[in-house]
Image (cartoon, rainbow, N blue to C red):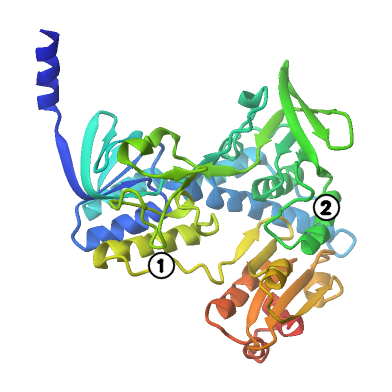
Amino acid sequence: MLNMLNMVKRRNIVTRQYDLAIIGTGAAASVAAERMRQAGWRVAVMDCRPFGGTCALRGCDPKKVLVEATVPVDHARRMQDKGVAGELHIDWHQLMAFKREFTDPVPEKREHRYADEGIDAYHGQARFTGKNALDVEGKTLEASHFLIASGAEPVKLGIPGEEYLVTNESFLTLDVLPHRIILVGGGYIAAEFSHIAARAGSQVTILQRGNSMLNRFDPELVDWLMASFKAIGVDVHTRSSVEAIEKSGNAYRVRAAAATQSAEYFEADLVVHAAGRRPAFDALDLQAAGIAVEKGRLQLNEYLQSVSNPAVYAAGDADQMGPPLTPVASHDAKVVAANLLEGNHQKPDYRGVPSVAFTIPPIASVGLSEAQAREKGIKFRMKSQKVADWFTARHAAQPVYGYKVLVDEETGCVLGAHLVGSHVDEVINLFALAIRHNLTANELKTTMFAYPTGASDIAYML
């Protein structure tokens, strides 16, 4: 009797057919879904979390809202005794309410947009059941092609008390900002969140296992930036590896060890995971679809296609081919869409992708680092200088300002630019334009930019 019931249930399962099924609803997923639907393909998207992806809901956008609120607070502090009197402060509750004006509408808007475009949307965890099939909360979907654009999640640290860590996503939803905060890690999240929290009144400690902060940026410029951490009271411990977290009442005790010292203990009301992210693959059952993975990385060809299952492509954080940035995710999606529509012919082009850590002031980078240029054996000239005495820095009372720019000696083209200081999050885009389109340093240098602006300093950097 039981076998008969199971047979009836299987016969009642409706298999839905698509040309393309996309796992995720972030930047890469949405770009690919819209392009393929416009081409007449039957498209489905699915997500186990609210629709919208990391950047719009849990990353870039809400973070930037918080950063922008702290900018005038810091500017006012620096301008004390220079014509600005009184103190500004952050009202955290009001700030979070303002942030929600950006994030709360996103899932519903994204869902309506899919519906308007004729894209089927599914809520739930996707799990592959075969080379051309997956399950989403009991619904079976078959497709000719799949795009894995499932984003990233915090890496596992494998330490006792790891369950007490809150994610960067949880930090961005805090209704009340705790007084004492520890950030475990030393990358973008730790740097940016420490600047937000300290300027909002928290006592912040960073425990970074590596030798320095922000290892994706030029180490010399990072050293210059560290003065801004000290100025706002952020206590940075490098070469400090977190070994355990204990709960003590309503607080936490973090044990960390340095290579040459005995263990140190730190107390906090909140401990934030800022030690890196990895692609969110665990729940997808990639093996069931014959999707090759090696050391946590999808095995892809140069067209972002799985080498073991040609029906599967990847984009964004899932492919791990380019920098883990939103513009890169969108670029990857366009590459995948072109290859699906016209056959494999287009490869991702990551030349001139700028990256910014939104500290105050920000630090930015594009192109080759000094070390990379030397490793490649390229002959280049380099200008590097700390220039807090330039007008751009002085008029804002900003003591941190500097640059390092590399130019190819043979072609005259810009190889790399590394900036720290006010407005560099915008100025870096001009260097990115030059690198991506092979503009020479002289072409940049002879361009007339509005003055006085951050861009008007470019000629002096070349």
Type of amino acid under label 1? Lys
Asked if residue 405 lies left or right of residue 334, the reply is right
Secondary structure beneath dot 2 equals loop
Residue 254 falls in which quadrant of the image? top right
Q: Circle 1 is placed at which residue position?
A: 347
Secondary structure beneath dot 1 equals loop
Give the percent coordinates (x, y) of residue 367: 62, 70
- Pick whichever, 237 or 345, lies toward us: 345
Write the residue at 73% across / 48% down. 195
Say few, some or many: other residues with alpha carbon within 10 Å of mark 1 (under 14 / 14 to 19 / 20 or more).
some
Write the residue at 71% across / 38% down. 183
- Pick whichever, 438 or 260, lies toward us: 260
Q: Which mark is residue 86?
A: 2
Write the residue at 52% across / 59% down. 322
Say few, some or many: other residues with alpha carbon within 10 Å of mark 2 (under 14 / 14 to 19 / 20 or more).
few
Residue 385 falls in which quadrant of the image? bottom right
Give the percent coordinates (x, y) of residue 239: 81, 42
Residue 176 falls in which quadrant of the image? top right
Quadrant location of the N terminus in the rendered image? top left
| For residue 139, above or below residue 118 | above
Asked if residue 15 lies left or right of residue 160, the reply is left
Type of amino acid under label 2? Gly
Q: Which mark is residue 113?
A: none
Query: CB under 8 Å between callouts 2 and 1?
Result: no
Give the percent coordinates (x, y) of residue 363: 71, 62
Residue 203 makes an appearance in the image: no
> Mark 2 or mark 1: which is in front?
1
Quadrant location of the C terminus in the rendered image? bottom right
Q: CA distance from mark 2 to mark 1?
A: 55 Å
Query: First in sequence: mark 2 or mark 1?
Result: 2
